[in-house]
């Protein structure tokens, strides 16, 4: 039951729903929402379907797309295993980025993902910002 109450301040509140909304609003204002900083480098997902092997390469536009591609490829391998299409597998997935100074001597190459602004590799970045289950 929601009941209106005048607290002599000129405002009328409804106990029940507003109390809960005020509590939630108070919590939200105390949470420090940190903006995700994507890298500016070109990215790609490298999928080694059966280690050792040449990788299957997918160029991606950002970290969110890389995570989605990685999840799809991993789920596809689990599906193939569960359906007895493949007897087993030893795969690996990684995200790499283009670095104009990969070796410190101005030689460009693909290197393991590292986000300088966040101070995170791809696994940590993914868990912090892209995971559906926070804290998992």
Image (tube, grey):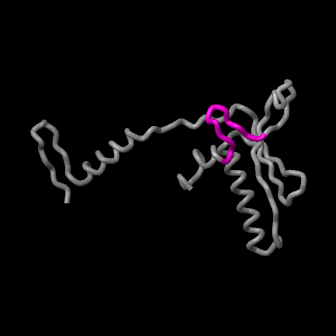
The spot of residue 32 in percent (x, y) is 45, 38
Is 54 left or right of 7, judged from the image as shown? right
The spot of residue 67 in percent (x, y) is 67, 49
| Residue sitting at x 72%, y 51% | 69
| Residue sitting at x 13%, y 36% | 10
Please name whichever residue, 33 or 84, is drawn nearer the observer in this view of the structure: 33
Res. 9 image quadrant: top left
Residue lying farthest right?
Answer: 53
User: Does residue 10 show up magenta in the picture?
Assistant: no
User: Does residue 120 show up magenta in the picture?
Assistant: yes
Q: Quadrant of the C terminus?
A: bottom right
Residues shaded magenta = 112-123
| Residue sitting at x 81%, y 70% | 88
| Residue sitting at x 47%, y 38% | 33
Res. 13 image quadrant: top left
The spot of residue 91 in percent (x, y) is 80, 59
Is 97 left or right of 31, judged from the image as shown? right
């Amino acid at each position: 039951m929601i009941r209106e109450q005048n607290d002599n301040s000129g405002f009328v509140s409804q106990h029940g729903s507003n109390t809960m909304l005020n509590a939630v609003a108070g919590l939200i204002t105390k949470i420090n929402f940190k903006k995700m900083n994507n890298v500016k480098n070109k990215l790609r997902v490298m999928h080694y379907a059966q280690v050792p092997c040449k990788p299957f390469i997918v160029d991606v536009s950002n970290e969110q797309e890389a995570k989605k591609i990685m999840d799809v490829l991993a789920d596809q391998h689990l599906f193939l295993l569960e359906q007895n299409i493949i007897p087993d597998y030893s795969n690996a997935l990684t995200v790499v980025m283009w670095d104009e100074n990969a070796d410190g001597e101005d030689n460009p190459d693909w290197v393991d993902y590292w986000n300088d602004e966040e101070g995170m590799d791809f696994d940590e970045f993914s868990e912090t910002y892209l995971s559906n289950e926070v804290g998992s």
